[in-house]
């Protein structure tokens, strides 16, 4: 996209303004933004995702123990209190070490604690069935934890049916190859 002012350079500064339920956008290059005094305004409103996460963590802590953050990662030695200050984890092991503190935060931000990425369009029926089976396994585990064994038996039977369908589908796909 080219700058809307000079029409020569690529637009790298983007502004969106909403006024009286009417949205207007302007896309300009760095030079035009500086000339029009827009660039300084953009720098003032710039924020880091780490700062946002750190603020959310602070707002979610209820007890003094959670605020102090004595939990420490066994691999890198990072304290939870350090994560709260920076919004950045030290290593992959931090996710496991801080799982009880991170779960509510991740659920609040993403709506779930499990990453669900894009799925390929080719073979998506099998992938969808596999995801459904995984969700049912999670439901089964929760039903057993609640000691709702009738529900668990129903879920178990549904898993078996879906797994048989998936296996038959894969066998059919191999036969066509």
Image: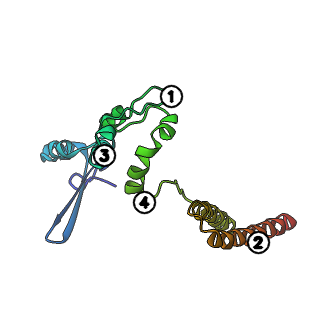
Callout 3 crowding tier (Cα within 10 Å): few <14, some 14–19, many ≥20: some
Which comes sooner in the sequence, label 2 or label 3? Answer: 3
Task: Report if the CB atoms under discs 1 and 2 are less than 8 Å apart.
Answer: no
Cα gap from disc 1 to disc 4, whole angstroms: 28 Å
Disc nearer the start of the sequence (4/3): 3
Query: Which badge, 2 or 4, is on the more N-terminal residue?
Result: 4
Q: CA distance from mark 2 to mark 3?
A: 45 Å
Residue indicated by mark 3: 61
For disc 1, the marked residue is: 74
Q: Give the numbered dot on residue 174.
A: none
Q: Are marks 1 and 4 in contact (CB under 8 Å)?
A: no
Q: Which residue is mark 2?
A: 165
First of labels 1, 4 by sequence position: 1
- Ranked by sequence position, the earlier of labels 1 and 3 is 3
Q: Which residue is mark 4?
A: 111
Q: Is residue 27 above or below residue 84?
A: below
Left or right: residue 98 compared with residue 149 = left
Q: CA distance from mark 1 to mark 3?
A: 22 Å
């Amino acid at each position: 996209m080219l700058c809307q002012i000079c029409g020569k350079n690529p637009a790298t500064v983007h502004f969106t303004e909403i006024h009286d339920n009417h949205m207007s956008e302007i896309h300009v290059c760095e030079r035009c933004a500086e000339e029009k005094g827009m660039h300084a305004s953009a720098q003032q409103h710039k924020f880091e995702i780490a700062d946002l996460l750190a603020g959310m963590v602070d707002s979610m802590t209820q007890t003094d123990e959670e605020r102090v953050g004595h939990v420490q990662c066994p691999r890198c030695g990072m304290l939870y209190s350090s994560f709260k200050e920076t919004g950045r984890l030290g290593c992959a092991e931090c996710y496991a070490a801080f799982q009880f503190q991170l779960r509510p935060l991740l659920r609040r931000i993403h709506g779930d604690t499990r990453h669900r990425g894009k799925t390929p369009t080719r073979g998506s029926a099998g992938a969808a069935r596999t995801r459904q089976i995984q969700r049912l396994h999670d439901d089964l585990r929760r039903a057993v934890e609640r000691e709702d064994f009738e529900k668990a038996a129903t879920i178990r039977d549904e898993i078996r049916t879906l797994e048989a369908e998936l296996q038959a589908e894969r066998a059919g796909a191999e036969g066509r190859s």
